[in-house]
Amino acid sequence: MRDTDPATFERYLAVIRSVPPAERFVRALALSALARDLAREGAARHSAHLGDNAVAERFLLQMYGPDVAARMTAMLRSDTPIAPPPHE
């Protein structure tokens, strides 16, 4: 479901497709960095009074969801090296 009419959405896609791939990649990286910065700032505003660990935990939860945040938080608390999850 979209809140944009099909013709407008098609024009949007045409504009996106007209940008060279390397520039699209750079823009995607910039947007990802912005999202991380905003999440970090939001976590700090919400949890700063609870300390740095609470800010880090909230940031992980916002950025990566409950499963990854729980795993990362447990590793950070135990000083265990962070490794990728095992493949199933």
Image: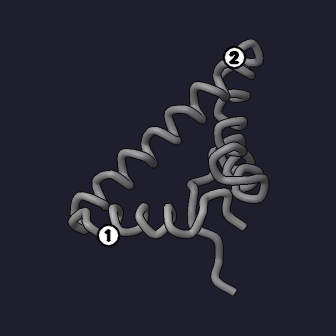
Q: How is the image coloured?
A: one colour
The picture quadrant where one finds residue 67 is: bottom right
Q: Which label belongs to residue 64? A: none
Pick the residue in front: 8 or 53. 8
Mark 2 Cα shell of 10 Å, populated few (<14), some (14-19), many (≥20): some
Mark 1 Cα shell of 10 Å, populated few (<14), some (14-19), many (≥20): few
Q: Secondary structure at mark 2?
A: helix
Q: Which residue is mark 2?
A: 48
Residue displayed at 74% across by 21% down? 47
CB contact under 8 Å: marks 2 and 1: no
With 29 as the anchor, is 54 left or right in this view? right
Pick the residue in front: 24 or 39. 24
- Image x and y of residue 61, in percent: 72, 45
Q: Which residue is mark 1?
A: 17
Q: Secondary structure at mark 1?
A: helix
Question: Callout 2, which amino acid?
Answer: Ala
Pick the residue in front: 22 or 71. 22
Q: Is residue 75 above or below residue 48?
A: below
The picture quadrant where one finds residue 42 is: top right
Residue displayed at 45% across by 48% down? 32
- Residue at mark 2 to residue at mark 1: CA–CA distance: 41 Å
**The furthest residue to the top:** 49
> Which callout, 2 or 1, points at the residue further toward the start of the chain?
1
Q: In the rendered view of the protein, which quadrant contains the C terminus?
A: bottom right
- Image x and y of residue 20, in percent: 21, 66
With 25 as the anchor, is 47 left or right in this view? right
